[in-house]
Image (cartoon, rainbow, N blue to C red):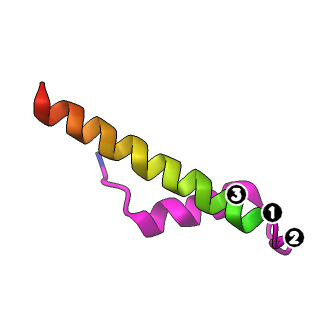
Amino acid sequence: MKRTTKKDFFLLLLQNTFTKKEKVPHYEVPLLILKYLQYMFEVLLLLLLQTHL
């Protein structure tokens, strides 16, 4: 399985959220960052759980 880097994930989020014709609305950016942080938090939690089991 290919490991997804932070950059890859962020680019995927951007691609999935907006079509190429759209400009990114300013209010959408914090939402993207929140989604990204949530994802990172979940990954960290999973890693912690795996190491302690």
Q: Any mark on residue 19, and which? A: 1
Name the residue at 31% across, 46% down: 44
Q: State the CA–CA distance, disc 2 to disc 3.
A: 16 Å
Disc 1 and disc 3 in contact, CB within 8 angstroms: no
- Pick out the residue farthest to the top: 53
Q: What is the x, y in percent for residue 27?
A: 81, 66
Residue 22 or residue 34, whichever sits in front: 34
Disc 2 and disc 1 in contact, CB within 8 angstroms: yes
Q: State the CA–CA distance, disc 2 to disc 1.
A: 6 Å
Q: Is residue 22 left or right of residue 1?
A: right
Q: What is the x, y in percent for residue 4?
A: 37, 56
Please report whichever mark, 2 or 3, sits nearer to the chain's N-terminal start.
Answer: 2
**Viewer-side label of 2, 3:** 3
Name the residue at 54% across, 64% down: 10
Q: Any mark on residue 31, and which? A: 3
* Residue range highlighted in magenta: 2-27
Q: Is residue 4 above or below residue 39?
A: below
Q: Secondary structure at mark 2?
A: loop
Q: What is the x, y in percent for residue 47?
A: 24, 41
- Give the total number of marks visible in the rendering: 3
Res 6 visible:
yes
Name the residue beneath numbered marker 2: 22
Give the residue type at disc 3.
Leu
The answer to if 30 sits in the magenta stretch is: no
Please report whichever mark, 1 or 3, sits nearer to the chain's N-terminal start.
Answer: 1
Give the residue type at disc 1.
Thr
